Amino acid sequence: MAKLRAFSGIQPSGDLHLGNYLGAIRNWVLEQHDRENIFCVVDLHAITLPQDPKLLHKRIRDLAKIYIACGIDPESVAIFVQSHIKEHAELAWLFNCLTPIGWLNRMTQFKEKTGDRRDQSSAGLFVYPALMAADILLYQADGVPVGEDQKQHVELTRDIAEKFNREYAPVFKVPQPWIKEDGARVMALDDPTKKMSKSGGPNNLIYMLDDPDVIVKRIKRAVTDTGTTVVFDSQRPGLFNLLEIYLLLSKPGTTKEAVEEHFAGKGYGALKSELAELVVETLKPVQQKYHEISEDPNYIEEILKRGADRVRPIAARTLDDAKAAMGLG
Ligand code: AQP
């Protein structure tokens, strides 16, 4: 039986953090051999907010290197840069013309990112979900492995696919959001009511490439409460978040009960120092591999070129079908 096809991507809008890893990349790695995978660096999404061109260019490559350093096998998985495949922008325009403004107005991420500065934000940020729909639908993906925060965008993608298929012709596969319960929403260290995020400031996250002493400092400073017992209590969101991260990074099969038993009679200090050690140990091989890969600048360029060459024919075929269905050309 043919494997199901997964499509996903991350924006090079900042350096990658533990939330991106636990909510997305780790699951991509764990399930890469069960599926056919297309993983993208979505640089066209990053420019919906202002970016420094030199830094963006570096971050695009760094992000692809981190995919590989985390364990994505570039021999079997297509890794490429969104802007290398022109079809993304072209299909996004077709979807901009198909998508009612009311659907975009409902997107909570746009509201969160713009706040009361909506009129100053770019039109690109508003139509971001239509570009995301194009990314996914171009490849006829069966599913989209993402964190919880992207669920609404994948649902909009489904709506766009269904509207197109109904109004023109059945061109697009309607994809599923593939969201794991574990790690789906890693919270900010400085405010556990918000998600850990690239744009949330340096105290909210742990970067994948942070030095061990920085990781220790960030976890020590993480907001908790005045309680003493170390238990999974959702009413204590700071503690709950640290325990969730601890559980996710522990040996497979570790249960919440086992974690609580391990910390029985110990305080928040013990949790923070053991968690810091676990994060450092988890990231050590990723960082080593990243530095190894970085020694040869041609390595990542070749991977990205090969990835784009592999997926371009799929994108071209889908776009041709969509344009023909709309009577274009
Ligand atoms: N805190 C998180 N917990 C779990 N998963 C998360 N993801 C992001 N933050 C968390 C998942 O990472 C993937 C890539 O996300 P993205 O970079 O394309 O966009 P994002 O979700 O907007 O990520 P950030 O870090 O919050 O970036 P900024 O601040 O630039 O918007 C997605 O699968 C996402 O679910």
Image (tube, grey):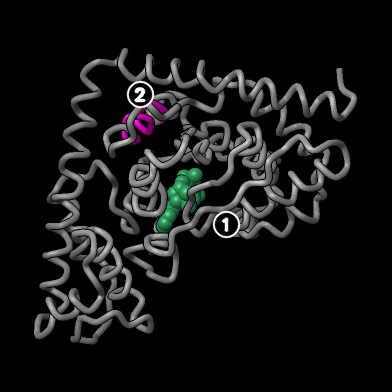
Q: Is residue 53 magenta?
A: no
**Residue shown at 66% from the left, 24% from the top:** 87
Look at label 1 and name its amino acid. Lys
- Image quarter (top left, top right, bottom left or bottom right) of the C terminus: top right
Dot 1 falls on a residue whose secondary structure is: helix
Residue shown at the point (67%, 20%) measured from the top left = 316
- Specify whether residue 199 is in view: no
What is the secondary structure assignment of the residue under circle 2? loop
Q: Which residue is mark 1?
A: 151
Q: Nearer the viewer, mark 2 or mark 1?
A: 2
Instruction: Determine the main secondary structure of the stretch shown in magenta.
Output: helix
Q: Nearer the viewer, residue 223 or 28?
A: 28
Answer with mark 2 or mark 1, whichever residue precedes in sequence. 2
The location of residue 235, given as percent across then percent down, is 38, 84
Q: Position of residue 40 (x, y in %)?
A: 48, 32
CA–CA distance in space, label 2 to label 1: 29 Å
Residue 86 as seen in the image, left or right of residue 14: right
Compared across the picture, whether 174 is left or right of 219 comes to right
Residue pointed to by mark 2: 75
Rendering coords of residue 190 (x, y %): 33, 65
Quadrant in which residue 103 is drawn: bottom right
- Give the vertical position of 232 relative to 207 (above or below): below
Q: Residue furthest front?
A: 1
Q: Magenta part of the protein: which range?
A: 60-67
